Image: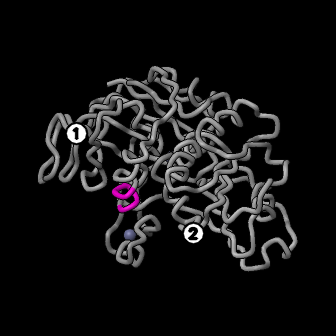
Amino acid sequence: MKAMILERPGAELVLADLPEPAPGPGQIQVAVSACGVCRTDLHVVDGDLTEPKLPIVPGHEIVGTVSELGAGVEGFEVGQRVGIPWLGHTCGGCSYCRSGTENLCDDPGFTGYQIDGGYAEKTVADADFCFALPGDRSDAEMAPWLCAGLIGYRSLVMAGEESKRLGIYGFGAAAHIVAQVASFQQREIYAFTSPGDQAAQSFARDMGAVWAGGSDEPSPRELDAAIIFAPVGPLVPAALRAVRKGGIVVCGGIHMSDIPQFPYSILWGERVVRSVANLTRQDAIDFLALAPRVPVETQIEEFPLADANKALQALRSGQLTGAAVLRP
Ligand SMILES: [Zn+2]
Ligand SMILES: [Zn+2]
């Protein structure tokens, strides 16, 4: 099968011919139809994250059809459409796994990072971490749901149910999904983009933002919470200055440049800064039930599998409006 592999961080992905992976006990083999390109893939490729399995097939926003069942798999059948997210495996026994926070598992496996992912024609995954994808949305449109959607949704939950005025810093794949869900929940979205990025600002307004401007501009209203998707540390103090007393700033990305020193006065007043790490399977169950009701519509740009480097470069340079999706 054809796959795009990373041999060492900092290098371009290479098109390789690999043997088809066989599903082990409890696993399913999936014929990949679409795989979204997430900013985390960029961090893996660029070497921002420690110790990926090498070589690795990146990609953790996978939509495809089940092509083979491993021993003992129940609940899936060949030909069924499934999604495979970032959380690929947990230990099941650590204190986090036993307390409903398996996203923090001490011994996890992440798709496209420690486990070969979806930049390939076929992949295998633990069936317990795969999700049936009902509905009539196309495979390519649904791919960004699997990470931008799920981790965006977890970030939105962490911003607090009562937070009506919500800032979003960085308006890419996750933001455009979160904005639709938040608007559906009667929240007001204030979108902060790179200064002068008119295309992203008009995209944010199209996705329901009541205001869009540069991250160097003050917020027009005091915010109840803010979610930062851009991997830019200086946005943390910027967002803290924009939220009210008791407001929450959620850092939704897996990696961020250093956060500059800031005065305690902007954290004072019981403001909260927190990160969101990974996802739980319950997040996926909740989001996959909610998204069709919104309904979430993703804006995508499709690339052939062999053009994965082009897709990554488009994301790196901020040329995308919405999400890049590879089509093996
Ligand atoms: Zn665990
Ligand atoms: Zn991701």
Name the foreground residue: 247 vs 65: 247
Q: From which residue to which does the magenta span run?
A: 282-286
Q: Nearer the viewer, mark 2 or mark 1?
A: 2
Position of the C terminus by quadrant = top left
Quick one: label 2, few (<14), some, or many (20+) residues within 10 Å?
few
Q: Quadrant of ligand 1?
A: bottom left
Looking at the rendered structure, the kind of residue marked 1 is Ala
Instruction: In the rendered structure, find residue 162 and report the number of the disc placed on it.
Output: 2
Quick one: label 1, few (<14), some, or many (20+) residues within 10 Å?
some
Q: How is the image coloured?
A: one colour
Q: Quadrant of residue 322?
A: top right
Name the foreground residue: 47 vs 278: 278
Q: Is residue 122 above or below residue 261?
A: above
* Distance from mark 2 CB to nearest ligand 2 atom below 8 Å: no
Does label 2 or label 1 sit earlier along the sequence? 1
Q: Position of residue 323 (x, y in %)?
A: 54, 34
SS for dot 2: loop
* Distance from mark 1 CB to nearest ligand 1 atom below 8 Å: no
Q: Position of residue 54 (x, y in %)?
A: 48, 43
Magenta-drawn stretch contains 284 = yes
- Write down the residue under mark 1: 22
SS for dot 1: loop
Seen at 46% across and 37% down, the residue is 297
- Mark 2 and mark 1: span between their CA atoms? 47 Å
Q: In the drawing, does residue 225 fall left or right of residue 160?
A: right
**Visible in this render: residue 109?**
yes
Q: Is residue 247 above or below residue 318?
A: below
Magenta-drawn stretch contains 43 = no
Name the foreground residue: 22 vs 174: 174
Q: Position of residue 98 (x, y in %)?
A: 35, 76
Q: Is residue 198 above or below residue 295?
A: above
Looking at the rendered structure, the kind of residue marked 2 is Glu
